[in-house]
Image (cartoon, rainbow, N blue to C red):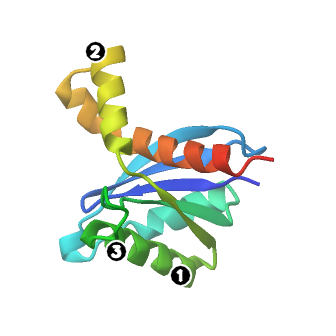
Amino acid sequence: MRIMGLDVGSKTVGVAISDRLGWTAQGIEIIPINEDKGVFGFDRIKELLDDYDIHHVVVGLPKNMNNTIGPRAEASMAYGQELEKLFQVKVSYQDERLTTVQVERMLVEEANTSRKKRKKVIDKLAAVMILQNYLDSHSN
C-alpha cells in the first residue's frame, strides 16, 4: 500500500509517494496553493490519491523548536483534518522540524544548486524527507 507525504505551506504543497512496499519515498510534484484566498489544491490531491490508490497521508508537522504547536503547525493540522473529511483517508503527522533547512543545505552544499532551482524543488524534497522519516520510523 502506497502512502502520500505532504509538506504543506501557505503557497505550495510538496508531494511525495512511497513505493508499493512502503520502503522509499519519491518526490512527485509541487501543488501551488493560496492559503489567503482559500485555494488548497484539494482537486489535485484527490487525483493523486486516486491515481496511486492511496488511503494514508502523512502531513509534515512544523513544530516549534521547543516542541510546541504554533500557527504553521495548526494550519498543517487543519489541512490534514480537511483531507480526512473530504477523502476519508487516514492522516498521520510527522515532526518536520528543520526538514526544509536540511533540504536547503543538501541542495547548496552537496548539489551546488542555484537559488532559483532550489526554490522549484525544495518543497517536493521536503515532502520526500517527511515521508521517508515516517517510513523509516514505522518499518518492521
Q: Amino acid at mark 2?
A: Asn
Q: Mark 1 packing: few (<14 Cα in 10 Å), some, or many (20+)?
A: few
Residue 119 placement (x, y as % from top left): 24, 37
Residue 104 position (above or below residue 135):
above
Q: Is residue 131 left or right of residue 127?
A: right
Q: CA distance from mark 2 to mark 3?
A: 33 Å
For the point 75% across and 47% down, which residue is it?
139
Q: Are marks 2 and 3 in contact (CB under 8 Å)?
A: no
**Residue 50 visible in this rendered orientation of the protein:** yes
Q: Are marks 3 and 1 in contact (CB under 8 Å)?
A: no
**Disc nearer the start of the sequence (2/1):** 1
| Circle 1: element type | helix
To which residue does mark 1 refer? 86
CB contact under 8 Å: marks 2 and 1: no
Is residue 3 found left or right of 108 in the rendered image?
right
Q: Which amino acid lies under the numbered mark 3 shown in the image of this protein?
A: Glu
In percent of width and height, residue 121 lies at: 34, 36
Res. 74 mark: 3
Residue 120: x %, y % from top left: 29, 37
At horizontal 42% and vertical 73% (from top left) the residue drawn is: 77
Please say if 26 is above or below 49: above
Badge 1 amino acid = Leu
The answer to whether residue 111 is seen in the rendering is no
- Of tags 2 and 3, the one toward the viewer is 3
Judging by the rendered image, the residue that carries numbered circle 2 is 112
For marks 2 and 1, give the one nearer the viewer: 2
Horizontal side of 23 relative to 16 (left or right) equals right
Distance from the alpha carbon under mark 3 to that under mark 1 = 18 Å
